Image: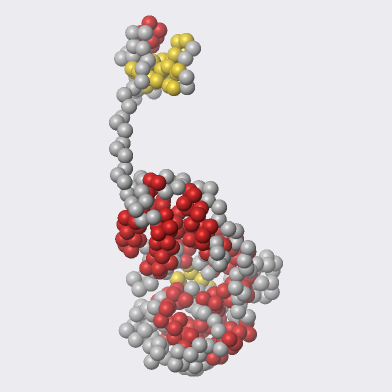
Amino acid sequence: MAKRDIGIRRIKIRRGLYIVKRGGIWYAEMCRHGVQTRRSLDTSDPTEATRRAASGEAPPGPEPRPAPKPASPALALGTALTEYEEWYAKNRRASGAHRALPVLRLFVAQVGEETDTRAVTRPHVQQFVEGRRDGRSGITVRGDFAVVRAFLRWIAGRKGTVDWNVCRGVETPKDDELTREAPSLEKVNAVLRALDGSWLRDYCTLLAETGMRPTELLGIRGTDLRGRLLSIVPWEGRQLKSKWSRRVIELNENAAAILRLREGKMFDKARPVFANEEGNVYKEASISHHFQDVLGGGKRRKPPEAVKMTLYDFRHFFCSEHAAPGPQHMEIEALAAYIGHSPASTQTLLRWYADQRALRRGAPTSLVGEPKEGKIVEMKRPGS
């Protein structure tokens, strides 16, 4: 085995002049006015290298620099947005496009569709943010800013015509507003009573007892239930929001009894428990419309104020109840993991809900009562 060269690799000749060894060859290295230059001495002998460097036979000089990259061709902001919309349609969810693209169209219209993307500056972004403040919450304005920042960074990374840091230092409003109050236990129970006779009663009870997202529950299959353990996993009929959404939760007895009863009536347990007539996953929007219609008494009437809720309010209710002190309290980290949040989201729960007393682990206690015995209500197509 060849011995490793651990000899001297840098020798000072005089002030500002050194010889350095790189890969067996010595180089003359000089620093003038803060600019360092290096040139090969074409020898592996340190004595000869010292002589050549000191005598000036191979005076240090700048190494040939690579040819500069050609400047990026001009790209109009409107053209960049068209390309971004095409990319977004292929790589992002349609729901995200519905929210983000209208904001970007406003930004492009304000700056100018024909404006060269190289001319976009921080004041352009700041002016747009200031214009969005009027009548909008701080969190909405910050969300709009994040959309614009993602767009400009996409241009910077793929086209090279925008400064990557163009959004750095932009001031956004602070969020000094309170979130909408979670529904009370009394209101949730009133809504569940209004759903008697509909399969939505089981569905909404499970939302209240597990804190699942409405789409997550719509994709639960019979094969996902193992006793009181429920696997929330992506499959061909349902994708999850993020990697943190994939999880296994322990159900309380009320939730487990509802799912066991429905799962026991299924012929194909590989299909969703709350499947449509074709055996596929319902769209959340379809169920939401059906939910509002049932609460309103049919014929597309609006629900009365006493039972006015959204499907997502059940998740809001779950977090509020289990973050509060009492026998139903869950440790904040356990609550975040249970509802499929990332570890960083504990700060969100602490801000809106938490009282950190009375820590507990395991399945959450039942919030809306004991399971009902008897036959289940069959699934029907919304509106039928």
**The quadrant where residue 208 appears:** bottom right
Task: For the N terminus, give its image quadrant.
Answer: top left
Q: Locate residue 196, reporting x and y percent.
A: 52, 92
Task: For the C terminus, give its image quadrant.
Answer: bottom left
Q: Is residue 109 above or below residue 153?
A: below
> Viewed as shown, does residue 175 lie left or right of 78?
right
| Residue at x 34%, y 22% (from the top left corner) | 63
**The quadrant where residue 309 appears:** bottom right
| Residue at x 51%, y 53% (from the top left corner) | 126
Q: Locate residue 93, reporting x and y percent.
A: 38, 66
Q: How many marks?
A: 0
| Residue at x 31%, y 33% (from the top left corner) | 68
> Which residue is nearer to you in this view: 153 or 37?
153
| Residue at x 38%, y 5% (from the top left corner) | 55
**The quadrant where residue 30 appears:** top left
Q: Is residue 327 above or below residue 356?
A: below
Can residue 260 be seen in this snapshot? no
Q: Locate residue 145, reporting x and y percent.
A: 49, 57
> Which residue is nearer to you in this view: 194 or 126?
126
